[in-house]
Amino acid sequence: MAPKQRDIGWEHDISIGGSRKLVKCNYCGKQVRGGITRLKQHIAHLSNQVEGCLRVPKEVSQILRQHFSEDSKKRAAIKFKKERLMKSLSEEDFYDVVDKNSEDDIEEWWFRKS
Ligand SMILES: [Zn+2]
């Protein structure tokens, strides 16, 4: 005759609304469907799919937004660096081998590079 406490707990913590991916915002108590990523978007006010949190402190929202944008910036920066490295290597070869006397062009190239 013991109550099924584990089942009740499971239902309240994980299975609210019939979805295991429903998570609850600690700031406003809103239940966000779609898991932790969607919850972060809710707190950072980043998605059109989810309503932004009205109770989260501005700092927290900003930090999270920065975290998101830094991630994509980092990825873009790495990609850019790689491409630039490949390009500069081939351009350096080009100047060394073919256009050795064109000092002005080389200077201009360095200027544009930085
Ligand atoms: Zn919230």
Image: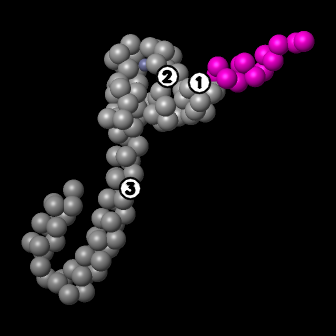
Residue 65 within the magenta-colored segment of the rendering:
no
**Amino acid of disc 3:** Ile
112 sits left or right of 46 in the view = left
Pointer 3: what residue?
A: 78
Q: Amino acid at mark 2?
A: Gln
Q: Does residue 66 appear in this view?
A: no
Q: Is mark 2 within 8 Å of ligand 1?
A: no
Q: Assess mark 1: CB under 8 A from ligand 1?
A: no
- Which residue of the protein is positioned furthest toward the left in this rendering? 104
Looking at the rendered structure, the kind of residue marked 1 is Ile
Q: Quadrant of residue 22?
A: top right
Q: Can you name the residue that lies furthest to the right here?
A: 1
Q: Nearer the viewer, mark 1 or mark 2?
A: 1
Q: Cα distance, mark 1 to mark 3?
A: 41 Å
Indicate which disc residue 31 carries. Answer: 2
Alpha carbons under labels 2 and 3: distance apart: 36 Å
Secondary element at image label 2: strand
In percent of the image, x 25 and y 76: which residue is there?
91
Image quadrant containing the N terminus = top right
102 horizontally vs 55: left or right: left
Nearest the viewer among 92 and 25 is 25
Q: Which residues are magenta?
A: 1-13
Q: Is residue 96 above or below residue 53?
A: below
Secondary structure mainly formed by the magenta segment = helix
> Which of the numbered marks, if any, corresponds to residue 91?
none
**Whole-percent x and y of residue 110?**
19, 64
Q: Residues within 10 Å of mark 2 (few under 14, many from 20)?
A: some
Name the residue furthest bottom.
98
Taking the image as shown, residue 21 lies to the left or right of residue 74, namely right
For disc 3, the neighbor class at 10 Å (few under 14, some 14 to 19, many from 20) is few
Name the residue that disc number 1 marks.
Answer: 16
N-term-proximal mark, 2 vs 3: 2
